[in-house]
Image (spheres, rainbow, N blue to C red):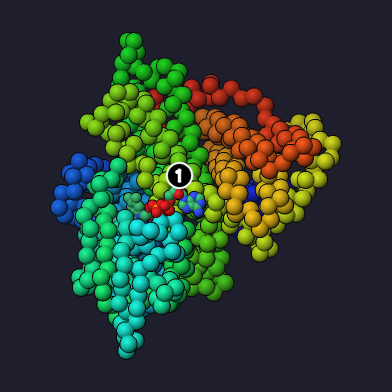
Amino acid sequence: MEVTNKLVKGGEFIIKETDAQDVFTPADFSEEQNMMHQTALDFVEKEVQPLLERLDNHEEGLMRGLMEKAGELGLFGVSIPEQYGGLDMDFTTSLRVTEGVGGGHSFPVAFAAHTGIAMLPILYFGNEEQKAKYLPGLTSGELMGAYCLTEPGSGSDALGAKTKAIPTEDGEHYVLNGQKMWITNGGFADVFIVFAQVDGDKFTGFIVERNTPGLSLGNEEHKMGIKGSSTRQVFLSDVKVPKSAVLGEIGKGHLIAFNILNIGRIKLAAACLGATKMASTLSVKYANERVQFKLPISKFGAIKHKLAQQAVRIYAVESAIYRAGMDIARMEQELLAKGQSHNEALLGAAREFAVECAILKVEGSEVLDYVVDEGVQVYGGYGFSADYPMDRAYRDSRINRIFEGTNEINRMLAVDMILKKAMKGELDLMGPAQAVQQELMAIPDFNLEEETGLFAAEKKTIQKLKKAILMVAGTAVQKYMNSLAKEQEVLMNIADMAIKVYTAESVLLRVEKEAATKGEEALSVQADIARVYLADAVDQVQKFGKDAIASMTEGDEQRLMAMGLKRFTKADLYNAKDARRRIADVLIAANEYAF
Ligand SMILES: Cc1cc2nc3c(=O)[nH]c(=O)nc-3n(C[C@H](O)[C@H](O)[C@H](O)COP(=O)(O)OP(=O)(O)OC[C@H]3O[C@@H](n4cnc5c(N)ncnc54)[C@H](O)[C@@H]3O)c2cc1C
């Protein structure tokens, strides 16, 4: 397989190999990136954590007050240009700050709604007048934002929104009527980004101010988790806004909604990452304190397995998040150098890596759910008690698989986007897929060459896993052609294979790169982490592949593909038990998440 240079294309990981020296890893964070992360962590620890109970009880003004403090600290302005009061920092720094606030339960939800889906539409699609009017206040925290896309009848099918915007006869105003559902920050926002259909079917964004007559709010929703975040319905009854409130172009609202979501998805993964580290630390500390059968429960293999597996999945998804984050930042620089504006460049870069953003949204949210679920188990009965912290962590985690596009929608989107890129000629998927088909017919290459170097064998495994994806995806395209979209189960199988392979490759590349500077000995436990993740990924890829092959083929073709899958998912048995014990021992000695 070809080795790429630094600037990679989105989705390309399926057909190409990456050189470890070309990936960005957390060891590459700048001092400034770490400092901003620490500021966010300190804010959560000192300002948010003490208020969790009161926030969950919706004490009047409390969340807004916290948000204002975060704004004063500069946390809202990380990626906002200086002319609007921001710090104009790079994309990786904004991910790092998002990770930093991620352990703040409901706070990161309010934070993400404000800094992401509310502010970014104005930054990227607003005209100069709109930016000058709203961005300084939204950046400093004087103004709060909310984003109104979802309606009672349209969630995943966001473009099916029914809210109407009718132009007045003189063309100077629009009158909005409709109902928006599940609006985060609804209770205290001053500025609402509202999507509505102009002339029936021209989906369009508007900026609507809170005090506009006709805009009213429902009661706070009673939610399973993130109870401290404000979630309300927004009713629009003859809300008259000037035409200057139109955001972007009439009929182009989908560009706002979808482009902002790409950035939102990788940021959601970063926020989940922050929450996972907190939950891992809680689990480790509790396991060290809790004594049963005269021993701290952290001495038991079953608990070590849990603590280690939490860390394996956290470290792996972290590797993938910052790898993709830097790929986006590099592409942004490339587009800037080609003469694109700052706004076009970041949006274009995020669009290029939309596949990775969708993958990370799914993996980030599912790792968090896994970590808190095992966290509850480590706590035993106390995990089920509302007086202990794992209860809130467990409940607050669950929403992440639902918003910013459900994980089902993101899985299908990831595959759909890869195939679209292939169809547009941006990604040569069919060439490598055909090569894999030919390889299936050929006599296996037993490859008896001696492998050398850290992860030499593991890298071969990754190459083969990619062939498994190509084999399954290629067959699906050939079989179903234009009706592939209806074969959702197969699409989900392919997405799951891609998610596991992208993450496994990312963690291997990270450890390889870091070991090259710090030495293999210093990274030996991280190498354990990478190998454990890979061993699990191989089994999962095999399972998803089997599922797809069994549903798509029969007879000789099925036998051939089953054999191919076996060949592409063949890996030596690995003693993951001992590796997990070594990983757990590091956590237990540090008494916290330690990687
Ligand atoms: C706490 C909270 C805060 C939120 N904040 C905001 C906000 O600030 N602004 C905003 O605009 N929205 C917000 N949302 C809405 C959120 O984005 C939607 O709930 C989400 O997009 C899913 O839509 P839905 O709830 O209508 O579910 P549905 O779309 O009805 O989905 C139900 C199930 O069907 C599946 N499904 C749907 N379509 C398909 C398909 N084509 N193929 C296969 N499966 C499918 C879904 O994956 C899901 O499992 C929030 C939601 C919650 C719960």
Q: Tell me the kind of residue under disc 1.
A: Gly
Q: Residue at x 48, y 22 (%)?
A: 581
Residue labelled with disc 1: 364
Q: Position of residue 281 (x, y in %)?
A: 35, 32
Q: State the image quarter where residue 466 is shown.
A: top right
Given residues 63 and 506, the one toward you in this image is: 63
Q: Residues within 10 Å of mark 1 (few under 14, many from 20)?
A: many
| 116 versus 202 height, above or below | above
Q: State the image quarter where residue 443 is shown.
A: top right
Mark 1 residue's CB less than 8 Å from ligand 1: no
Q: Position of residue 144 (x, y in %)?
A: 26, 62
How many marks on residues?
1
| 88 versus 168 height, above or below | above
The extreme bottom residue here reads: 170
Q: Residue at x 51, y 39 (%)?
A: 316
Q: Residue at x 41, y 22 (%)?
A: 303
